[in-house]
Image: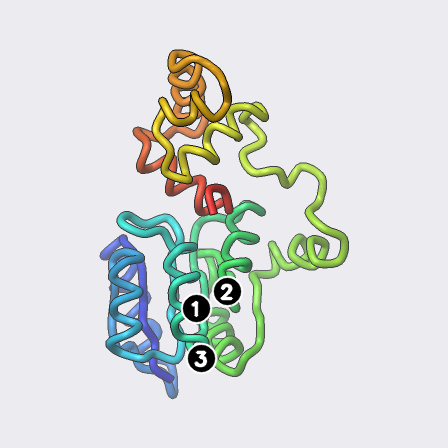
């Protein structure tokens, strides 16, 4: 099994590569530090499985997963991330991920998940499996709205920011003043604890907004 490891933290990526390389029948054929590089390396290396982090610079893991599964449907994407919220899980599944593990997973769990997704199966960490089943059985559970700490209008503004609109364009779309939009954007940044627009867009797209 040929594996591509994608993570923007060098030490974690190095440790993961070492762990996978010791697993029988598995070989790490490449690494990537962001989503854009992951898409390029997938095209170059033709791995069987891509182990994908979600919160990364350049191109987040959800968008990278979407691009990879669209262009290379035979490549399985296994998400391995610290993000355990419903928004991230469902966004990754919608993008085409075949598995979703949390970074607390041990070597044995990662090995089993790699085997599963490589054979066309779907696998989730036990802590989120029940939520995923509930989602597909009866729709999103109550309280699964993206970023519940935001007001409806702030969430709407964040969605438009994630779609690439400027503050002035958002103001025209919502028929409000530029100052009102600036205030909403500032509130969103504060509530999400992000430093700027690019980080807010990454968080929003991880949660399925702006797509």
Query: How many numbered markers are drawn?
Result: 3
The residue identified by callout 2 is: 96
The residue sitting at the bottom extreme is: 25
Q: Which residue is drawn at 36% across and 22% down?
A: 168
How far across and how far down the image is residue 173, in percent? 47, 26
Alpha-carbon neighbours of circle 1 within 10 Å: few (<14), some, or many (≥20)? Answer: few
Question: Decide: marks 1, 3 in contact (CB < 8 A)?
Answer: no
How far across and how far down the image is residue 63, in percent? 40, 55
The residue identified by callout 3 is: 74
The residue identified by callout 1 is: 70
Question: Decide: marks 2, 1 in contact (CB < 8 A)?
Answer: yes
Report the coloring of the rendering: rainbow
Q: Which residue is drawn at 31% across and 37% down?
A: 198
Instruction: Determine which quarter of the picture holds residue 71.
Output: bottom left
Mark 3 and mark 2: Cα distance apart in space: 11 Å
Q: Determine whether, in the image, residue 104 is placed left or right of residue 149.
A: left
Disc nearer the start of the sequence (2/1)? 1
Q: Which residue is drawn at 64% across and 41% down?
A: 144
Q: Which mark is residue 101?
A: none
Q: Residue at x 45, y 67 (%)?
A: 78
Judged from the image, the secondary structure of the residue bearing numbered disc 3 is loop
Between tags 2 and 1, which lies in front? 1
Front in this rendered view, residue 149 or 101: 149
Mark 2 and mark 1: Cα distance apart in space: 8 Å
Q: Quadrant of the N terminus?
A: bottom left
């Amino acid at each position: 099994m040929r594996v591509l490891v994608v993570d923007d933290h060098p030490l974690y990526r190095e440790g993961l590569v070492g762990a996978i390389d010791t697993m029988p029948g598995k070989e790490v054929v490449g690494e990537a530090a962001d989503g854009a590089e992951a898409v390029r390396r997938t095209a170059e290396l033709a791995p069987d499985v891509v182990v994908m982090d979600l919160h990364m610079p350049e191109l987040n893991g959800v968008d990278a997963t979407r691009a990879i599964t669209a262009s290379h449907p035979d490549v399985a994407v296994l998400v391995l991330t610290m993000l355990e919220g419903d928004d991230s899980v469902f966004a990754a599944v919608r993008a085409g991920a075949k598995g979703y593990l949390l970074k607390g997973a041990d070597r044995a769990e990662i090995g089993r998940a790699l085997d599963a997704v490589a054979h066309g199966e779907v696998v989730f960490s036990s802590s989120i499996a029940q939520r995923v089943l509930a989602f597909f059985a009866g729709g999103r559970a109550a309280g699964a709205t993206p970023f519940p700490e935001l007001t409806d209008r702030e969430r709407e503004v964040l969605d438009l920011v994630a779609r690439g609109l400027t503050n002035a364009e958002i103001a025209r779309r919502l028929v409000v003043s530029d100052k009102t939009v600036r205030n909403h954007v500032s509130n969103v940044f504060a509530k999400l604890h992000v430093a700027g627009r690019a980080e807010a867009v990454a968080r929003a797209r991880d949660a399925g907004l702006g797509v």
